[in-house]
């Protein structure tokens, strides 16, 4: 097994709230030892990620900020690259650039954006990644693809982190995971979101067996660069409790899997702080997952685990 990446932890929070409360939240996340505050990119009741992350970076000094993830279908990659590089400069090199193919059906329907089949969205994402990497690098970009065309554009400003901010790509399907393995620095292991919603249908794709299959895809596609990849997972259910089994029985129906499978899933955590820390160590030993993102409602409950594991 390759040497492990050290543990780090992120909070996913997207507002909306007041300016003061958002800044206070960012400082609290930083103070509790979390590595990153991330924002999703949806068109419902939440902040737009880039200005929200800019404000969070301005309110802190060491906290990293990240898009988890920008939906490629909502903005042209030339614009996404310019916004990402600007935020990287203004945050003094603390930005993590997550980019995804888009998935949430209600966003597309409400905004009147055409929801193409997954393969076409992934084709478009692959072209977008080529463009943004070119714009982050030195020299003009000339690109002629099926979906985008860029004619001699020099990307400015250049990001502070070189060659570019860490790029995060995640997913649950084999094609997007293989793309992430080849192109990203951070690979997010997610449930398969092909149906466009997260519900109990996602559960069978959240099991330890499904996770092993995803890691196998990533390892095969990454080749020699696998050891350099940071594997990330989004924990959708996290509860600190003395009744680990009882909580697993409550969580299992929402995940659509058995209590035992729920406890073994990397997308769920239940138990005492010590039991959760042990689970995370075991998952890193087995799969290499070292970057853990939890929801805002788990901020305080997860803090003792962060204090125990972050950086180790």
Image (cartoon, rainbow, N blue to C red):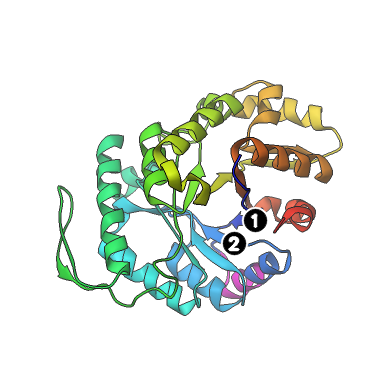
Query: Viewer-proximal residue, 197 or 172?
Result: 172
Near mark 2 (Cα within 10 A), the count class, few <14, some 14-19 or many ≥20, is many
Marks 2 and 1 in Cβ contact (< 8 Å): yes
Residue at position x 46%, y 79% in the image: 90
What x and y, as percent, mark residue 312?
72, 55
The part of the image, by quadrant, that contains residue 195 is top left
What's drawn in magenta, residue-wise?
17-25
Tell me which numbered mark, 2 or 1, is placed earlier along the sequence: 1
Residue at position x 50%, y 76% in the image: 91
Residue 61 higher or lower than 38, as above or below: below
What x and y, as percent, mark residue 155?
27, 72
Separation of residues labelled 2 and 1 (CA atoms): 8 Å
Residue furthest top in the image: 258
Query: Viewer-proximal residue, 21 or 232?
Result: 232
Q: SS class of the residue under badge 1?
A: strand
Circle number at residue 8: 1
Left or right placement of residue 102 versus residue 290 in this view: left
Residue 142 forms part of the magenta stretch: no
Residue 181 higher or lower than 148, as above or below: above
The residue that disc 2 covers is 36
The part of the image, by quadrant, that contains residue 220 is top left
What x and y, as percent, mark residue 137?
30, 69
Q: SS class of the residue under badge 2?
A: strand
């Amino acid at each position: 097994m390759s040497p492990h990446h050290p543990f780090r932890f992120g909070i996913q929070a997207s507002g909306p709230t007041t300016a003061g409360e958002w800044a206070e939240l960012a400082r609290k996340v930083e103070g509790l030892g979390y590595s990153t505050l991330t924002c999703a990119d949806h068109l419902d009741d939440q902040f737009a990620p880039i200005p929200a992350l800019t404000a969070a970076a301005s309110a802190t000094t060491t906290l990293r900020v990240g898009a988890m993830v920008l939906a490629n279908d909502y903005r042209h990659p030339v614009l996404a690259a310019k916004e990402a590089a600007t935020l990287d400069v203004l945050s003094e090199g603390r930005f993590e650039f997550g980019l995804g193919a888009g998935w949430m059906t209600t966003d597309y329907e409400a905004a009147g954006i055409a929801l193409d089949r997954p393969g076409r969205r992934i084709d478009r994402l692959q072209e977008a990644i080529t463009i943004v990497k070119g714009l982050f690098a030195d020299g003009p970009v000339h690109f002629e693809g099926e979906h985008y065309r860029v004619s001699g554009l020099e990307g400015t400003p250049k990001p502070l982190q070189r060659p570019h901010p860490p790029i995060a790509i995640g997913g649950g399907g084999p094609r997007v995971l293989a793309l992430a393995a080849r192109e990203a620095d951070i690979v997010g292991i997610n449930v398969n979101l092909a149906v466009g919603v997260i519900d109990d249908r996602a559960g069978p794709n959240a099991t330890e067996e499904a996770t092993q299959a995803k890691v196998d895809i990533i390892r095969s596609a990454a080749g020699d660069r696998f050891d350099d990849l940071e594997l990330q997972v989004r924990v959708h259910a996290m509860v600190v409790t003395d009744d680990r089994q009882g909580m697993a029985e409550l969580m299992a129906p929402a995940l659509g899997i058995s209590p035992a499978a729920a406890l073994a899933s990397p997308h769920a955590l239940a138990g005492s702080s010590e039991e959760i820390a042990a689970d995370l160590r075991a998952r890193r030993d087995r799969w290499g997952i070292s970057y853990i993102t939890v929801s805002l409602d788990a901020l305080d409950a997860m803090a003792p685990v962060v204090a125990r594991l972050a950086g180790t």
